[in-house]
Amino acid sequence: MRKTLLFMSMLLFVGLAAHAQRGQGGQRGQRGQRLDPEEAAKTQAENFQEQFGLSDEQYKKTYDVLLATNKERNEKLQEMRSSGSFEGMREAIAEFQEKADKQLKEIFNETQWTAYEKWKEERASQRGGRRGGGRGGN
């Protein structure tokens, strides 16, 4: 249960901010390409600033955490894809989410952190049973 929640949190964390500002495209740009880590971090940090009332200093720190996490995660997942090793991807994503959350908890104040956790729970429940990226797989 915990791994599933962490996995869903990571997916939400990465995709929702961009999705909220760009419509149905998730983290994709105009032509369907994935956003680079800088663009994704900027979009996520802006969304967090708006939703949770981050100060400019908190925004900068949040951006830095998200950028580092996005870069690290993308490199790790690319390594896994290129080696054909898809097992463990969920766990890797969950680890990156957990790492980012630990850092964000130090940046956000108590009220912001509570709102962030509530936001993650709501997004996870909205996505509910959709697994496998909506590809119809079991």
Image (spheres, helix red, strand yellow):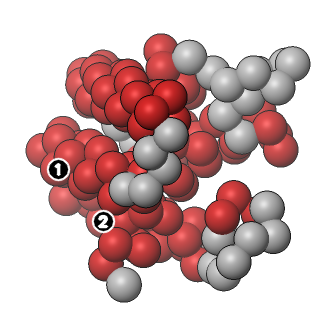
Vertical placement of residue 120 versus 125, above or below: above
Q: Is residue 122 visible?
A: yes
99 sits to left or right of 12: left
Judging depth in this view, the residue of 101 and 76 nearest the camera is 76
Vertical placement of residue 71 versus 69, above or below: above
Q: Which amino acid type corresponds to the residue marked 1 in the rendered image?
A: Lys
Q: Is residue 70 visible?
A: no
Q: Which amino acid type corresponds to the residue marked 2 in the rendered image?
A: Thr
Total residue callouts = 2
7 sits to left or right of 113: right
Disc 1 element: helix
Residue at coordinates 47% horizontally, 15% vertically from top-left?
Answer: 38
Packing grade of label 1 (10 A; few <14, some 14-19, many >=20) is few
According to the image, label 2 marks what residue? 114
Q: Position of residue 28 (x, y in %)?
A: 73, 29
Residue at coordinates 85% horizontally, 19% vertically from top-left?
Answer: 30
Where on the picture, by quarter, is residue 134?
bottom right
Judging depth in this view, the residue of 105 and 74 nearest the camera is 74
According to the image, label 1 marks what residue? 102
Seen as rendered, the residue at the extreme right is 31
Q: Position of residue 16 (x, y in %)?
A: 60, 47
Seen as rendered, the residue at the extreme front is 84
Judging depth in this view, the residue of 54 and 39 nearest the camera is 39
